[in-house]
Image: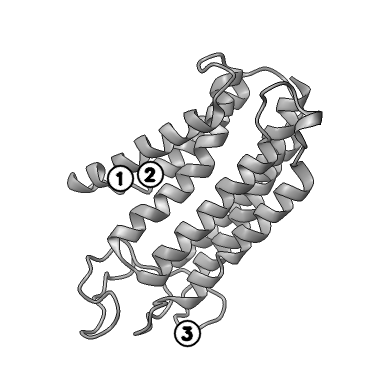
Amino acid sequence: MHEILALPAGCPYAAWQRPNIRWCEQMQCSYVVTPINAWSNVFYLAAALCMYVALHRPATSRRHSAPDLGAVFAAATVITGLCSFSYHATYTYVFQIVDFCGMFAFLSVALALALQRARVLPSRRLVLQSTTMTVAFSLMVPLLAMYGVKYQIMIVLQVLALVVLEFASGARDRTHMWRALTFIVLALSASVADQTGAYCDPASWVQGHAVWHLLSAVAMFYQAKHCVLSDRRA
């Protein structure tokens, strides 16, 4: 684990509270504190564009009142990228919470759809359901922080919940889901290697957590594709 470091006095965000973890990349006295980790969030924007192009359906080709799932997932992915950028640009606790809000935005859409298929939630008002879940999960972050709990565990638990709900929902083509899981495991491996120092070169253009951004963006594309195509088959 990397030591949590203060920013030098006079630097942007120096007086702000630091987050609960630090990544390998060397911090800059700049408005973008960790530029590689910050700008690598462009991969989420690219994934969002791919989702929209591949999965978007006009209203005339959707069931009555059904949301455009391609557009919903694309919007959630854009939110993920922008929120993550704000965190890595500032290296502050406040924007770390914002970063989690972004991750919850995407996961909540996938969870809401899974809960709809499991008949736990009604099969309507997806945006309201996922927004409510995002807010609830986000409020848990400072609560867990008060008790010294690593709130990163929430992301792992939500991914596990998605897997359990998927296998409880009956047999369907899970090709894209397996691809999503493969890429998220690879992404997690890169992030863990960065966090533990197994791979750490602070001045390198290749940062482990930036690789997480790339691989998790690919995983999100495949998860969105799985969810959208499963919904169309239902």
Q: Quadrant of the C terminus?
A: top right
> How packed is label 3: few (under 14 Cα within 10 Å), some, or many (20 or more)?
few
Q: CA distance from mark 2 to mark 1?
A: 10 Å
Looking at the rendered structure, the number of numbered marks drawn on it comes to 3
Q: Amino acid at mark 1?
A: Val
Q: Quadrant of residue 230?
A: top right
Pointer 3 or 2: first along the chain: 2
Query: Given the current orientation, which residue lies at the most extreme top position?
Result: 119
Q: CA distance from mark 3 to mark 2?
A: 28 Å
Tell me which residue sits at (46%, 75%) in the image: 200
Pointer 2 or 1: first along the chain: 1
Q: 215 and 39: which one is in front?
A: 39
Tell me which residue sits at (56%, 13%) in the image: 119
- In this rendering, the answer to whether 40 lies above or below 31 is above
> How packed is label 1: few (under 14 Cα within 10 Å), some, or many (20 or more)?
many
Q: Amino acid at mark 3?
A: Ala
Whether residue 178 is visible to the viewer of this picture, yes or no, is no
Q: Secondary structure at mark 1?
A: helix
Q: Which residue is mark 3?
A: 203
In contact (CB < 8 Å): disc 2 and disc 1: no
Q: Amino acid at mark 2?
A: Ile
